[in-house]
Amino acid sequence: MFLSVIPRLIGAPPVLEEHLIPEVGVEELRWAYRRMRIGAAHGPDGIPNTALQAAVEACFDSFRRVFTACLREGCFPARCKGSS
């Protein structure tokens, strides 16, 4: 695991992953979902961008927690990796 190669002082408390990968910020998420083009063709999931924007607005903190967990765990669903 990459945490073992981070130099730290002897006797220092362990480095927690949340210190290395911060939570997805409010402004960061707002910037991302505002960049979605309304009226653009939907992706392979068939969900229009207007629906995605509405979902983010309705469940903002849930989306932030999920995206933060994906970054910290290094786990991204295959559908999220598709090209745009």
Image (cartoon, grey):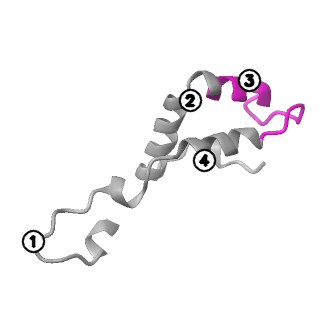
| Nearest to N terminus: mark 2 or mark 1 | 1
Residue 11's label in the rendered image is 1
Query: What residue would you read off at disc 2?
Result: 60
Residue 32: image x %, image y %?
68, 44
Visible in this render: residue 78?
no
Q: Which residue is mark 4?
A: 28
Residue 4's place in the image compared with 74, above or below, is below
Residue 7: image x %, image y %?
26, 78
Q: Earlier in the sequence, mark 1 or mark 4?
A: 1
| Majority secondary structure in the magenta region | loop
Q: Which residues are magenta?
A: 36-56
Residue on which the image places disc 3? 51
On the image, which quarter does residue 11 sit in? bottom left
Kindly report the distance in space between the C-alpha atoms of the residues bearing marks 2 and 3.
13 Å
Taking the spot 71% from the left edge, 29% from the top edge, the residue there is 53
Q: Amino acid at mark 1?
A: Gly
- What is the C-alpha distance between the residues marked 1 and 4? 35 Å
Q: Is residue 47 above or below residue 11?
A: above
> Is 13 left, or right, of 56 in this rendering?
left
